[in-house]
Image (tube, grey):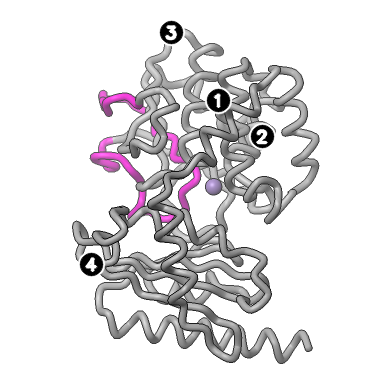
């Protein structure tokens, strides 16, 4: 049986379904989660379908998430998440069966059924194809959730277009008459303090001769600019297409977890293999890591610098 049908067969068997995704969600995680919840709710109106996890106030244009409830026989669907440790549920072990749907390269195997399509731009694109194949319902709300993930995971259709992504996006936008002005405002309207913080980063990057840029942000700088740790992870995507930067990385202190969260982006050198050595991973050109000891951060930066050196050597 093909993967899509296998997933539908499992969904049919369960009355209680919980849909989860990675911690600290982005709009692909939340968009895919909400799209799946609402499409399944239309297709199977008698099932109890919950979308769970903690979210952030920056996404308050989206509907509220549900409180996690696990009965004896509950199916868990994990979206947009390759790491076992990053599933945003209270108790993973209480679920009867687990399905994973993702577009990240495989890191941990934690599900009974797995649909991984790394050739696709976003989990929202994976779901678009799955909904079409299984004839799951769309409406304008579901279409808008899918478009959020497609837009943001591709940097507004800049980083990757996948197969026919623009055709799929156009289908959602025109068939469901999406208000793109409002959708873009929801995604891109920013506060001045975030932009000032971005200015601090660009002014203080340490840039090597191999074009590797890095900075460590301690708590005092977050306080000075009145931003939280999550802002680093958002502003990093704005440094794309700067001629002097080949790889750029921001390490930000997370006072709650007492760790440094590292975000890495690249215009060419492969960075996810290096990140995997430091409790992280991700896409070849967009990755992250988590480091406890500050000395380790320099090791990671040095390895990224080596990747830049090699890339420049191989491509000149
Ligand atoms: Mn994603």
Secondary structure of residue under mark 2 = loop
- Residue at x 59%, y 49% (from the top left corner): 103
Per the image, the residue denoted by label 1 is 9
255 to 25, vertically: above or below = below
What are the residue bounds of the magenta stretch? 65-94
Asked if the residue at tag 2 contacts the one at tag 1, i.e. Cβ–Cβ closer than 8 Å, the answer is: yes
Q: Which mark is residue 220?
A: 4
Secondary structure of residue under mark 1 = helix
C-alpha span from label 3 to label 1: 16 Å
Task: Decide whether the magenta segment is chiefly helix, strand or loop.
Answer: loop
Q: Which mark is residue 1?
A: 2
Asked if the residue at tag 2 contacts the one at tag 4, i.e. Cβ–Cβ closer than 8 Å, the answer is: no
Left or right side of 76 for 92: left
Left or right side of 46 for 129: right
Residue nearest the observer in this picture, 88 or 146: 146
40 to 78, vertically: above or below = above
**The stretch drawn in magenta includes residue 56:** no
Q: Which mark is residue 255?
A: none
Measured as percent of width and height from the top left, residue 1 is found at: 66, 34
Secondary structure of residue under mark 4 = helix
**The stretch drawn in magenta includes residue 83:** yes
C-alpha span from label 2 to label 3: 26 Å
Asked if the residue at tag 1 contacts the one at tag 3, i.e. Cβ–Cβ closer than 8 Å, the answer is: no
- Between discs 2 and 3, the one toward the N terminus: 2
Per the image, the residue denoted by label 3 is 46
- Residue at x 69%, y 17% (from the top left corner): 176
- Between discs 3 and 1, the one toward the N terminus: 1
Q: Is residue 108 visible?
A: yes
């Amino acid at each position: 049986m093909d993967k899509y049908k296998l997933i539908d067969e499992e969904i049919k068997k369960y009355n209680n379904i919980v849909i989860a995704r990675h911690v600290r969600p982005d709009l692909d995680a939340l968009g895919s989660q909400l799209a799946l919840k609402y499409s399944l709710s239309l297709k199977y109106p008698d099932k109890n379908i919950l979308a769970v996890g903690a979210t952030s106030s920056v996404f308050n244009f989206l509907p509220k998430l549900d409180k996690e409830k696990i009965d004896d026989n509950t199916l868990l669907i994990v979206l947009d998440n390759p790491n076992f440790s990053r599933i945003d549920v209270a108790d993973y072990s209480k679920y009867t069966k687990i399905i994973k749907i993702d577009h990240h390269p495989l890191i941990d195997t934690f599900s009974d059924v797995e649909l991984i399509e790394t050739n696709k731009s976003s989990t929202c694109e994976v779901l678009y194809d799955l909904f079409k194949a299984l004839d799951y319902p769309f409406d304008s709300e579901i279409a808008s959730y899918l478009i959020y993930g497609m837009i943001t995971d591709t940097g507004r259709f800049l980083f990757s277009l996948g197969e026919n992504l623009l055709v799929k996006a156009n289908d959602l936008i025109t068939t469901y008459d999406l208000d793109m002005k409002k959708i873009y405002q929801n995604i891109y309207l920013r506060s001045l303090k975030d932009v000032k913080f971005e200015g601090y980063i660009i002014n203080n990057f340490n840039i090597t001769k191999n074009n590797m840029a890095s900075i460590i942000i301690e708590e005092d700088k977050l306080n000075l600019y009145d931003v939280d740790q999550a802002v680093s992870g958002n502003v990093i995507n704005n440094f794309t297409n700067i001629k002097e930067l080949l790889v750029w990385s921001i390490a930000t202190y997370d006072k709650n977890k007492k760790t440094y969260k590292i975000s890495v982006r690249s215009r060419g050198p492969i960075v996810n293999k290096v990140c995997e050595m430091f409790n992280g991973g991700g896409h070849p050109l967009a990755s992250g890591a988590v480091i406890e000891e500050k000395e380790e951060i320099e090791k990671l930066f040095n390895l990224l610098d080596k990747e830049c050196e090699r890339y420049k050597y191989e491509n000149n």
